[in-house]
Amino acid sequence: MDTKIVALIGNAKRHIYFADSINDSYPLAGIVVEKKYSAKNRFLSLLKRSHYNPLRLSGKLYYKIKLRKIDKRYEKAENDILLGGNAYIKLRGVCPVLYTDDINSDPVKMFIKKIGPSLLLVSGTSLIKRDIIGTMPPNTIINMHTGLSPYYRGGPCTFWCLYNEEPEFLGVTIHFLTQGIDSGDIIFSRRMTDIEPGDNEATLDCKIIRLGTQLMLEAVKGSINSLLKSTPQWEKGKIFNLRDL
């Protein structure tokens, strides 16, 4: 029986790179793109997190303006490291693509059920909840986490490793997705050793995504050949969040 694969991704260039890279080796049966980085969604998220308080909202807006510099760094890093200098990328292939504001919505659930995949691959989405997890048998949803679980869970882990002055924890984890946050059994885990003078959060994150995508391809190959092994996480570790700043 052919292996049907569906990718659930964010809508940044690095996430599209992930889906395209998988599709080059294992043609995807479908892709779900969560538009969580749209201007509308960013504003609504800020409004909700400020508890609709104008003073809190203004403070968070100021903080977001400062983060625009980081966004520009990411755009350059994505173009240079992942796209070979190209400034434009699109989803290639002819598989169905569903765009959504909510990765846990009913349309996403119906999209997955209609295709009937044997594997779901995840990169860059919001937390996937019970309703979506329940559409698949155990150990058939694989997540790429840009951090070393269990030590660094949540995100953005590359930022937190640098903030905490712990570059030894820069890396990526390929694991089975569960209802916990980056807590599923580990399939592959690699430290990021390709660190050069002049690297910043964005360049390191893109290098980690490039490494993680290669590991995800290995995981898909292992799953298809029924050779995939995993290891339970040996401690709870810590969950990080940008809102903790």
Image (cartoon, rainbow, N blue to C red):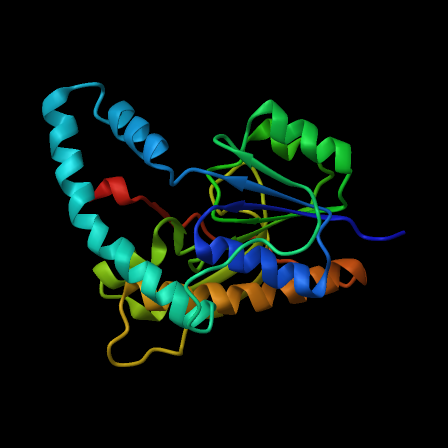
**Residue furthest out toward the top:** 52
Vertical order, 107 against 244 (above or below): above
Residue 234 showing in the rendered view:
no
Name the side, left or right, on which 62 lies relative to 116: left
Q: Nearer the viewer, residue 113 or 167?
A: 113
- Residue 2 picture location, percent across and down: 85, 53
Vertical order, 111 against 140 (above or below): above
Q: Nearer the viewer, residue 29 or 148?
A: 29
Name the side, left or right, on which 205 lies relative to 27: left
- Residue 107 picture location, percent across and down: 62, 26
Count of numbered marks: 0
Q: Residue at x 43, y 47 (%)?
A: 236
Residue 112 showing in the rendered view:
yes
Q: Quadrant of the C terminus?
A: top left
- Residue 163 picture location, percent across and down: 22, 59
Q: Nearer the viewer, residue 110 or 88?
A: 88
Q: Residue at x 50, y 30 (%)?
A: 102
**Residue furthest out toward the right:** 1
Vertical order, 132 against 69 (above or below): above
Q: Nearer the viewer, residue 40 or 10?
A: 40
- Residue 216 picture location, percent across and down: 61, 61
Q: Quadrant of residue 65?
A: top left
Q: Residue at x 13, y 39 (%)?
A: 62
Q: Quadrant of residue 191?
A: bottom left
